[in-house]
Amino acid sequence: MTEVAFHFNTPDKLGYACRLLRKAVGAGSTVVVTGDDGLLARLDAELWTFSALDFVPHGRDGAAPPAVVARSPVVLTGSPRSAPHHQVLLNLGEAVPPGYETFERLIEVVTGEAADRQAARERWKHYAARGYAIKRHDLAQEPQ
C-alpha cells in the first residue's frame, strides 16, 4: 500500500519542492512531480536556479524528449499514471493525483494559504476513507 505523507505549513511550495527533490535524488530516489502546467513550468525553471552549487537532473514530460524523461530521476508531469517510474510521487496540485496508488510513496505539499489547506483536507479525507495511514509533518513546528 502506498505510504502517504502530508508536509503542512510550507512557506514556499516551489522552494520546498526543490530542496525535497535535491535530497531525494541525493539519496538515489526517483520522483515524479505532478501539478498544473503553470506550476510545473515554474518548478522546471526553479530547479535550474534555486542553488548555485546544486543541480537536480529532471525532465518535463512533453517538453523534453521521451528518452530524456525516461532516464531522469525527477519527472515533471501532469499525468503521473504514465510516468516512467513509480517510487515517489510529489503532489503540488490541488486534486488527488490519478494513479497515486501505483507509487510506493506519495508526498503532499501544503502551504498555509486557506484555499490550499482546504484542498489538502479533501485529499486527506480521500486517502483516509481508503484506509491509508497518513503521516503528518507540520513544518511550522519543526526546528529551522
Image: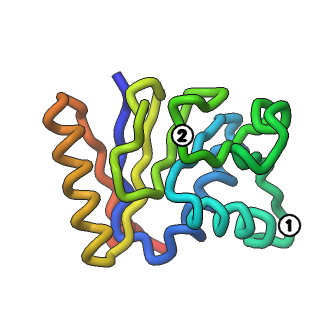
Q: Is residue 111 above or below residue 123?
A: below
Q: Which residue is mark 2?
A: 79
Left or right of 28? Residue 105 is: left
Residue sitting farthest toward the left: 129
Q: Quadrant of residue 96?
A: top left
Q: Secondary structure at mark 2?
A: loop
Q: What residue sits 24% from the left and 32% below the top?
A: 132
Q: Quadrant of residue 83?
A: top right
* x and y, in percent, of residue 98 in the image: 41, 36
* x and y, in percent, of residue 67 in the image: 84, 31
Q: Which residue is mark 1?
A: 53
Looking at the image, is mark 2 or mark 1 earlier in the sequence? Answer: 1
In three-dimensional space, the C-alpha distance between marks 2 and 1, rounded to whole angstroms, equals 30 Å
Q: What residue sits 35% from the left and 39% below the top?
A: 4
Q: Nearer the viewer, residue 36 or 53?
A: 36
Q: Is residue 131 above or below residue 4?
A: above
Q: Is residue 123 above or below residue 28?
A: below
Q: Quadrant of residue 138?
A: bottom left
Q: Identify the colour scheme used.
A: rainbow
